[in-house]
Amino acid sequence: MFICRIFLLLWLFALSPLKAAESGPLIDAAERHIRIQTQGYAGKVGIVMGKVDATRLPPCEALQAYTPTGARLSGKTYIGVRCLGPNSWSILVPAQISISGNYVITARPLAAGQVLESSDLNTTSGDLSALPASVVTDPTNAIGKTLRNSLSGGQPLRTDQLIAPLVIRQGQNVRVISKGTGFAVTSEGKAIHNAAAGQVVQVRMPTGQTLSGIATSDGNVEIAF
């Protein structure tokens, strides 16, 4: 009788196998993750999801998508999807992410050390995912800056090819504005080194104390408390 019960259980188990994980929910979770993470991108995002074989994965009730370490959310990439329960596993889902948008190119050959003007630049459109991540997308972010190296005409412009103009020079007397909640104190000091807007600059105060702050576009130094 005991042996008959065992065979009966095995027979019922064969008729009702455990359902394996399905590829559809995996791909949907990965695509939702991409759309959320690329909401702030400059340009129109296009997503083509690849195929994944989930037939060997145990069933899952809760999926979580994530960006794997070192993965880019552009071009050919992979999105990770992990199972939070009742089983524990993870899988990589392939994807192709295109970003259609505008970017800046040189209007003509430009020399190193040249200060860029609007006439030196043109704007064109294309797939930003096929370009370096540092490509300039707004010409106003390049105008007034100096080229580090010579560029040929029609070449995409990158932020690492630009030198921001100095707003503070070494030895210059600067206004130091110390700001905190409900107060602002202004004093004067002497800049220890050069700085462009947004860079950290050290200032020697009349007391001999050295303070660090952020150089502003108008040549002041702001210190937040």
Image (cartoon, rainbow, N blue to C red):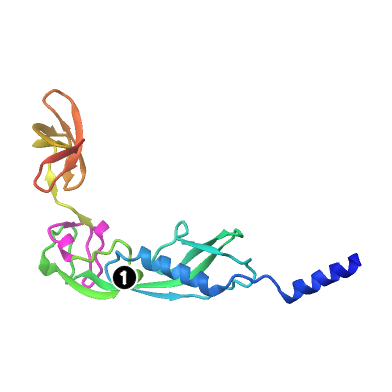
Quadrant hosting residue 71: bottom left
Front position in the image: 166 or 197? 197
The x, y position of residue 104, in whole percent, is 21, 69
Left or right for 110, reference 172: right
Q: Is residue 142 visible?
A: no
Q: Is residue 83 magenta?
A: no
Q: Residue at x 8, y 32 (%)?
A: 188
The furthest residue to the front: 1
Q: Which residues are magenta?
A: 139-161
Quadrant hosting residue 208: top left
- Note whether 215 is above or below 171 in the view shown: below
Number of other residues with Cα within 10 Å of mark 1, as a class: few under 14, some 14 to 19, many 20 or more = many
Main secondary-structure element of the magenta-colored stretch: loop
Q: Residue at x 14, y 39 (%)?
A: 221
At mark 1, the secondary structure is: helix
Q: Is residue 9 visible?
A: yes
The x, y position of residue 47, in whole percent, is 40, 74
Front position in the image: 75 or 52? 52
The furthest residue to the top: 207
The x, y position of residue 86, in whole percent, is 60, 59
Inspect the image, locate mark 1, and give the three-letter code of the amino acid beneath it: Leu
The residue tagged 1 is 128
